[in-house]
Amino acid sequence: MDKSGDREGTAVEKILDVLALGRVRFHELSMRGRVVLSQLPLNVTMLFICLLVALTDAREFDDPGFVTAQACALALLAIAAALPWDRIPYGWFLAVPILDFVPIGILRYSTESTLSGLGILGVFPIMWLAGSGYRPRIMVPIGGVAALFMVWVPQFLTGRATPHALASDLLVPFMLLAIGLGSSVMTLSAMAQQARVEELLERTENRERLLNTVLDTVDVGVLVLDDDGKSAYMNAKQRQLYVASLPNGVPTTRESELLIYRDGSDQPVPPEQRPLGRVIAGETIEHEVYQLGHGPDARTVSISGRQFSGASGNNAGTVFASTDVTEVVAAVHARDKFLGAMSHEFRTPLTNILGYAELLQDDTSLSPAAKSDLQIMMRNARHLNHMVDDILAASLTGDDAASIRLPLDLTELVRQTSDSFGPEATNRDITLDLAADTALPILGDRTGLVRILNNLVSNALKYSPAGTTVTLTAREEGEWAVCEVTDEGLGIAHEDMGRLFTRFQRSDAALRSGIPGTGLGLALAKEVAEQHGGELECTSEVGVGSVFTLRLPLRTAKQRMTLS
């Protein structure tokens, strides 16, 4: 019983809140509350009429018609409040506004001499019928007919239904019908707009749920901040990474206290260098690697972040994407460690083999056949040694490979390369020409650049037949220091050019030639060139030869002054 009273009290409070234009809206009320609220304006107006009558002519309270009209109106209000409209078929509630024309007609007739024009009270039920949106093509005409009965029935009952009297009372029903039509049009338009808005809201909600599902499914952490820098969204993966960066035993903390490290440092990244603050300040970051937390549960992540603009063009917030690369980094470290160890283990015995082979080469007691076999052994040992160098270089290629930049002269490097390969060219009966007269100052890693030149010249000699020429050219070309290696060898087919600089890939012609190789040299050479801000290109024609062009940035005058 108390609960029922509480519910009724709550319903009354909601109705009063709607009347006071508060936070509760009409459509949020129960069906009973909406029916009561729709009936209430007529009853309040009739109560106001009672006050007017009390001030003007209290004798109207003795009129049975006046009292009957008020009683009927109150009875209809009681019916509206008593019936469980939620359980009654929809539309039956419109019987209340149709019946409202009865007390309005009685009141109009009984107070005609005291208060004229009370037929306009019919605007309440007619607007209710039109505003309900329920079968407006039927309900609006029914309201018009009810209004007509409201003014004509008393004429017939009193015997005053002359053509002139009936015609003079048509104005009120006509006005009420017009109001009903106008209200119906506006109601239907509002309902159509509301349906469209609800459809758009449903689509938006479905898309939001789909987006949230996708973001929680992908294995990338996503963090969205609003324009004030406060967290607006964090997917499941990002929450995992956030937990990994928390200090031990702390369930949550500020971003400045999270355990974020970089470059293997034991000290957390300072607040002003952290990606969150930098991006909020307007900076865009891409694929920056950090370590979150420490110990066995630490995670290595690649973070990208940038601001995004709203429809007005103003900053609307910030988006961060964090990719967990812990396993990848661990695999790379394990690979590098393995390759380094294996390269060292291979290089030691190969060095011993070459050393003893060179000693045996000077032995005068060896027969020509033995010396020939020794040459084959030394050549294959050198080839294995080159392969080990390529594999070791592949394991070291990265940002550290070109981190030490020293002032160098590309022309001098080309000249030294030509001198180094002179004996090999002579042994192969290949002419090695050099055209390098102008100094070409650059900044670079000597080891990496020598590896590029050695690889290009070595390939040119390997794939060129005896009696041909290999040309080394060093020249200045605008802001570039350029080195070209031209040969008259096998050439490279057009279909093989696309994978020429791909690791462990060799052209079909090279494979058919039987010339040994790993397919690493050109790929590593291109990577080192790009790390120096340069490029390595190739043009070739099968049966004619190839031209490999290395371009590196010339050292600027400012750099020269700084280094001098």
Image (tube, helix red, strand yellow):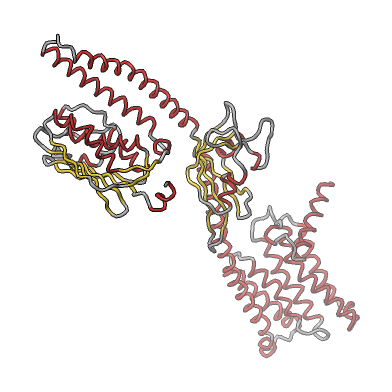
Which quadrant of the view contains residue 422?
Answer: top left
Vertical side of 505 occupied by 256: above or below: below
Left or right of 485 in this view: 225: right
- In front: 546, or 436? 436
- In front: 539, or 214? 539
The count of marks equals 0
Q: In this view, which residue lies farthest toward the left?
A: 467
Q: Position of residue 469 (x, y in %)?
A: 13, 38
Q: Residue at x 58, y 45 (%)?
A: 273
Q: Position of residue 552 (x, y in %)?
A: 32, 46
Left or right of 314 in this view: 3: right
Q: Position of residue 444 (x, y in %)?
A: 37, 41
Q: In this view, which residue lies farthest toward the bottom?
A: 164
Which quadrant of the view contains residue 170?
Answer: bottom right
- In front: 213, or 206? 213
Which quadrant of the view contains residue 188?
Answer: bottom right
